[in-house]
Image: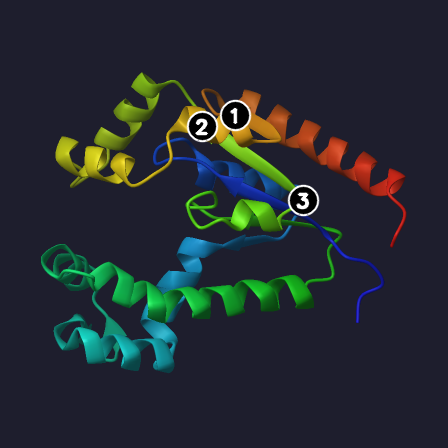
Amino acid sequence: MRDSQPIVIGLTGSIGMGKSTTAEMFKAEGVPVWDADSTVHRLYSSDAGAIAAISKICPKATTSGIVDREILKDWIKKTPMGLQQLEQIVHPLVAQDRQKFLETNPAQIIVLDVPLLFETGLNTSVDFVVVVSVPADVQRARVLARSNMTVAQFESILAKQIPDADKRAQADFVIDTSSIDMAKAAVLEILNTVRSNQQETPDA
């Protein structure tokens, strides 16, 4: 049992905005970070229940006891309701993993790194929302510089995400990741603010 509840920060941002780099900055300051994407990767590679359930809806996607993400992506594109079927399997497992992380971590501040924080409604379950952002042209250049990324893929991903402007409008803090130094300074400022808030707020 812990004596008090941690302050939970939800970290999010659209593709190419620098979220992963910013998450590492929080880690460098001693803040534990739960990573939604890493959790899904782990489920696909080592969770027997998830792999077995996915094999039932897409047998070709499970090979050598793990989930082949590329085959699964292709299946989703070709299968009506395929994404919804997958989400029904994966989302509860991800939520369980996230809750376990929150309940067992002794830290006073915890970051949840969730790409689709707003899209999944998780923004209402955290104490503060941090959105990472850069100008659209910088975002586009970053993403298209990735190997195997096409303009069509980039635009398809953007279409599934809430616009950056809307995320920023709903954020408690916005971190401009145009430069590493700016982002680091913002992370430190956010942690100082959150810690001050924590000290001023008595335990319920």
Q: Are marks 1 and 2 in contact (CB under 8 Å)?
A: yes
Q: Is residue 24 above or below residue 163?
A: below
Q: Quadrant of the N terminus?
A: bottom right
Secondary structure of the residue carrying numbered label 2 = helix
Whether residue 192 appears in this view of the structure is yes
Q: Nearer the viewer, residue 8 or 37?
A: 8
Earlier in the chain: of badge 1 and badge 3, it is 3
Residue at mark 1:
169
Q: Residues within 10 Å of mark 2 (few under 14, many from 20)?
A: few
Residue 28 position within the rendered picture, expressed as x and y whole percent measured from the top left = 61, 42
Secondary structure of the residue carrying numbered label 3 = loop
Instruction: Return the mark for residue 127.
Output: 3
Q: CA distance from mark 3 to mark 2?
A: 19 Å
Residue at mark 2:
166
The answer to whether residue 8 is left or right of residue 98 is: right
Type of amino acid under label 1 = Ala
Q: Name the residue at 27% across, 25% down.
A: 140
